[in-house]
Amino acid sequence: QLKLVESGGGSVQPGGSLRLSCAASESEFTLDYYAIGWFRQAPGKEREGVSCISGSGRSTNYADSVKGRFTISRDNVKNTVSLEMNNLNPEDTAIYYCAAAPGDTFQAMCFFVPKAADFDSWGQGTQVTVSS
């Protein structure tokens, strides 16, 4: 069963940058069949979709709150998906998760901001803290 692992979180000052990575925990799984979504959950808030990228990488989508600051990409040779986060602000503070949607599902097209209920194979999350 596919399981994902996130890395790259940390603490930065407002205006700083971080790059998160998502990879399969077992090398036998290739991610190019799956759309990968990034989600985040701040204390006391519901988990929200941040960005999505289709298996081919040709389709992406972003929440309005991160458009122009975050960039999702994937390297299907290295079997990883990245989330480049720039110009971070305190409202971006949260645990960030990646999750997968099989390529034969509508949500895998990434026509819309991902919904947590439509994705599976969640990682354990990585903490991002933006504070001065």
Image (tube, rainbow, N blue to C red):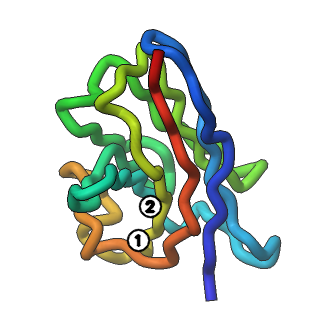
**17 or 93, nearer to the observer:** 93
Q: Which mark is residue 35?
A: 2
Kindly identify the residue that appears in the image at 35 percent across and 44 percent down: 51
Point 36% across, 72% down: residue: 119
Which amino acid, mark 2? Ala
Q: Nearer the viewer, residue 14 or 81?
A: 14
Name the one closer to the observer, 40 or 36: 40
Tag shown at residue 121: none
Tell me, for residue 101, which label it has, or none. 1
Which of the 4 image quadrants contains residue 25?
Answer: bottom right
Residue 73 position, x and y percent, is 53, 37
Residue at 36%, 21% in the rendered image: 89
- 109 displayed left or right of 74: left
Compared with 55, 103 (above or below) is: below
Residue 115 location in percent, x, y?
23, 63
Callout 1 amino acid:
Ala
Nearer-N-terminus badge (1/2): 2
111 to the left or right of 38: left
Question: How far from the left and from the top, in percent, is residue 27?
Answer: 81, 71
